[in-house]
Image (cartoon, rainbow, N blue to C red):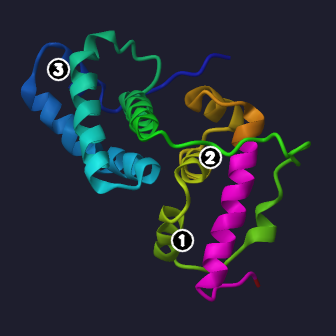
Amino acid sequence: MEAVYVDKNLELVQECMRGSRAAQFELYKLYAKAMYNVALRILNYEEEAEDVLQEAFLDAFTRIVDFRQETTFGLWLKQIVINKSINYLRKRKFEFVGTDEVSEVPDEVSADEYEVQLQADEIRKAITQLPDGYRVVLSLYLLEGYDHEEIAHILKISENTSRTQYMRAKKKLKNILEQKGMRDE
């Protein structure tokens, strides 16, 4: 069965396709905060996230005639934001830790083993302290909902590297939180 997407903002998108600046501004207001947060989670720098946000909207509105409504406008825009954010990281030349010394990557460990009763702000602050490669994979997997195959494709890395980065990111995040006096219960 083929997935059918119902875009509640389809009318605004169609107005944008006809060149309506007012419709563009409405879409911007609807999506700007969420897309900024996506970029910020990946980039970790407010200025770069703001730049990505502006570039993504400019790109989306310039290419809106290419939008075929195979997905919602929000998902299409989110993909643009993620791709632009990854390109910014590449300009910074962040590196993923190689997997040469890892012979086998275990399957996902259940979330129950990592239950930590913390406020979201404390976790977000700890995530910002992760190295770029760790933070990007962790954000894409946990916060954006991509699987390792999709992350590997987006970042042009192997699926094994994505899994390794994710495991190491979780371990490093746990260490950061433990250093702040927060322990598993």
Residue type at numbered disc 2: Tyr
**Residue 64 drawn at (x, y percent):** 27, 17
Q: Which mark is residue 37?
A: none
**Viewer-closest of 93 and 38:** 93
- Residue sitting farthest toward the bottom: 181
Horizontal placement of 160 versus 130: left or right? right
Question: In what element is the residue under mark 2?
Answer: helix
Marks 3,2: beta carbons within 8 A: no
Residue 130 location, quadrant: bottom right
Q: Which residue is mark 1?
A: 123
- Residue 141 marker: 2
Question: Which residue does the numbered mark 3 point to in the structure image?
Answer: 15
- At x 74%, y 54%, the residue is 167
Q: Residues within 10 Å of mark 2 (few under 14, many from 20)?
A: some
Query: Magenta residues, as a range?
Result: 163-184
Question: Could you classify mark 1 by the number of other residues whose Cα lies within 10 Å: few (under 14), some (14-19), or many (20 or more)?
Answer: some
Q: Quadrant of the C terminus?
A: bottom right
Residue type for callout 3: Glu
Label 3 Cα crowd, 10 Å radius (few <14 / some 14-19 / many 20+): some
Q: Is residue 72 magenta?
A: no
Q: CA distance from mark 1 to mark 2?
A: 15 Å
Quarter of the image holding residue 175?
bottom right
Tag 1: amino acid: Ile
